[in-house]
Each structure stands twice: as structure tokens, then as C-alpha cells.
Image: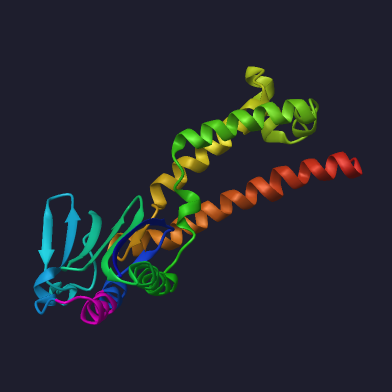
Amino acid sequence: MTTEYSMIKELRSYYIDLSLISEIQKYIKQKAIEFDTVSDIDERYHVIIIDSIGSEKLSKIDDYHFPFFTDDIKSITINYAGMQLIIKIKLSLYRTSIEISYNGNSSREIVTGIFSGISQLLRNYKTNDYLFSMPLLLFFCAAYFTVSFIYMVNSNLEDSLKEYYIFNKIYERGNINITVILSIGLPLIYAIICSIFKSFNTFHTRHNEKLKRLGNWLIYGFLAFVIFGIIFTYIRIKALGF
């Protein structure tokens, strides 16, 4: 029985280079040969690369003759539009999406099978950058929750932190609430650092290669400071008294 089945999925973050696009291209064309009835598969397949200047449409990724993508790249869209099978994969700075549609026998099984195959290819290029790409609004919400939680759990946090020279000086000069500074300031600093050095997806560009090591050092160093320098110290003071 002939049926039509479609699937749209949002996926996690990936490191996108020419080898990944090439692997996806090979897989899509194999499935087009297997499940579509057209003979002009190559003409129905194309890759669109968008940067800050404009867009470039390629019949295959092999026509891209550079080792890196441009530093200002925005997205890559892989598209195959056959008679029975349609596949569209969009990889941008902010999201990863896959659309698959098939009209024929066992359409659900074929679509889910193709999706699994593409997901397997992408899995080799996955990153954890999606953890650093939440909108700034979420950081303010987290900061508000942190402030409320700290006040509810223990109102003596400032007394513990005032033992540290830097926090004591801040407190003395402006009589500023240290809890508010930490609860709002730290998430804000973290958000700014992440917005500079991280995006949802990372493209293989010269600029990203330079930022990679510096960004990881700053982000993970900042998290280590928060966890070991503040949170663990507070727990130690409350539990052991020193």
C-alpha cells in the first residue's frame, strides 16, 4: 500500500566540516538510488552555503575548493528533491534540523531508517556546544532563581564570603549585597563569554580554529572558579567551620 510519511526533527550541536557534508551527500545519493524512481539524481541534489555576503549553490560539495569555510558562514543546507523522496538538512549557527518525506510502500520504515542513518553519521561529529548556546534570557531567569534560592536556604552566605579579601573590599566600599553580585554577575559573565566563543553548531573555519583553545580555557576555567573557588568553599565553611 502506497502511503506518504514525513518527519521533521531538531537535533543537537555538531562540528561541521567538509568531510561531514561529503559523508551525508554520499549517503543521501545512495538512498535516492535505492528508493526514488528518478534517473537525474545528481540534478535534484544541491548544497547551499550562506554567509554574510550572500549564498552559493553547489551541485555537490566537491565543487567547494577550499579547506575551510569562510569565517562569516551562517548556514549550510543540504537538499534532495526527488519524485518520491525528499530530504532537507539545515546546519546553521543556531540550530540543526532534518526534514524527510517519502511517498511509497513502507514509507514510515523508510523515513525512520534514513533518519537513523543520517543521525549515525552526525553522531561522529557531535559536540557539547549546545550547553553554551542558551539565550541570555535564560541566564537572567537562572540568576533570579539563584538569588531566591540562596536567600531561602541560608541568609548567612554574605558573612562567609566576607572572609575573602576581594569580596570584603567590594562590600565595604559600596555596601553592596554580595549575594546579588554573585547570583546575577556570574551568570551574566558566563553568558557573555559563551556568546563570544561558542555557537550552537561550529563550522570548520580558520577563525574558529583559533578561538577553540582560548574559548575552552576561559569557559572551563570560569566554571572551575565558580565550583571550586566559591561553592566548595562555602560548603566547607558550613560543614567544617573553617
- Viewer-proximal residue among 51 and 23: 23
Magenta stretch secondary structure, dominant: helix
Q: Is residue 90 magenta?
A: no
Q: Position of residue 115 (x, y in %)?
A: 37, 68
Instruction: Classify residue 199 as left or right of residue 56.
Output: right
The magenta region covers 25-37
Instruction: Classify residue 19 as left or right of residue 46.
Output: right
- Residue 18 visible somewhere in the drawing: yes
What's the image's color scheme?
rainbow
Is residue 214 placed above or below 149 in the rendered structure? below
Instruction: Spot the residue most to the front.
Output: 1
Is residue 227 placed above or below 146 in the rendered structure? below
Q: Residue 106 sits in which quadrant?
A: bottom left
Q: Position of residue 82 (x, y in %)?
A: 16, 68
The residue that appears at 70% across and 46% down in the rendered structure is 229
Total number of numbered discs in the rendering: 0
Is residue 175 placed above or below 34 in the rendered structure? above
Q: Residue 3 sits in which quadrant?
A: bottom left
Q: Position of residue 183 (x, y in %)?
A: 62, 32
The residue that appears at 38% across and 56% down in the rendered structure is 9
Q: Quadrant of the C terminus?
A: top right
Instruction: Classify residue 132 as left or right of residue 36.
Output: right
Q: Position of residue 1 (x, y in %)?
A: 30, 70
- Viewer-proximal residue among 107 and 124: 107
Q: Is residue 33 magenta?
A: yes
Q: Residue 170 sits in which quadrant?
A: top right
